[in-house]
Image (cartoon, grey):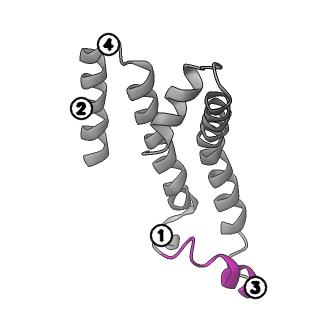
Amino acid sequence: LPVGVPAVVQFCTPNFTSIENIFATLGGGAIFFLNLILPFLAMHFMSRNYQNLSESKTYEKYSALYFELKLNRGSLQVQYYSIYFFRRLFYIFILAFLSNYPRVQAALCVRRSVIAVV
């Protein structure tokens, strides 16, 4: 989140006046793209490896990713990190794209917090 918001702002307001600004815009675009694709990569990776956790080789390699998760509750439990990334991405979009609408921004942030608590 601390990197995602400035990356989105930098990417959406490009400034090509100097070489530093060009690199900042390209770097912001790369981080912005990574923020968009990371939840889907996490979802795919966690689901694929969840099915193979019974094998000792797979468990030894990836057990740190599943350490805090309760795997006996079903395959939806392994999507915790994907849901976490989506929530953060939603928050980034609220902050970056709704800056002209502070009341809507505040209402969505409050709703997001209430939903996260429930």
Question: Which residue position is annotated with label 3?
Answer: 57
The numbered mark, 1 or 2, whose residue comes first in the sequence reads 1
Question: Which residue position is annotated with label 2?
Answer: 110
Q: Are marks 1 and 4 in contact (CB under 8 Å)?
A: no
For residue 51, above or below residue 80:
below
The numbered mark, 4 or 3, whose residue comes first in the sequence reads 3
Segment tinted magenta in the rendering = 56-67
The number of callouts visible is: 4
The image's mark for residue 101 is 4
The numbered mark, 3 or 2, whose residue comes first in the sequence reads 3
Question: Which residue position is annotated with label 1?
Answer: 69
The reply to whether the magenta stretch includes residue 112 is no
Q: Are marks 4 and 2 in contact (CB under 8 Å)?
A: no
Depth check: give the residue in front, 11 or 111: 11
Q: Cα distance, mark 4 to mark 2?
A: 14 Å
The numbered mark, 1 or 4, whose residue comes first in the sequence reads 1
Q: Cα distance, mark 3 to mark 1?
A: 19 Å
Q: Of circles 4 and 3, which is in front?
A: 4
Q: Is residue 113 left or right of residue 91?
A: left
Q: Amino acid at mark 4?
A: Tyr
Q: Position of residue 81 (x, y in %)?
A: 51, 56
The numbered mark, 3 or 1, whose residue comes first in the sequence reads 3
Q: Amino acid at mark 1?
A: Leu
The reply to whether the magenta stretch includes residue 57 is yes
Q: Secondary structure at mark 3?
A: helix
Residue at the outermost front position: 18
Q: Position of residue 93 (x, y in %)?
A: 46, 28
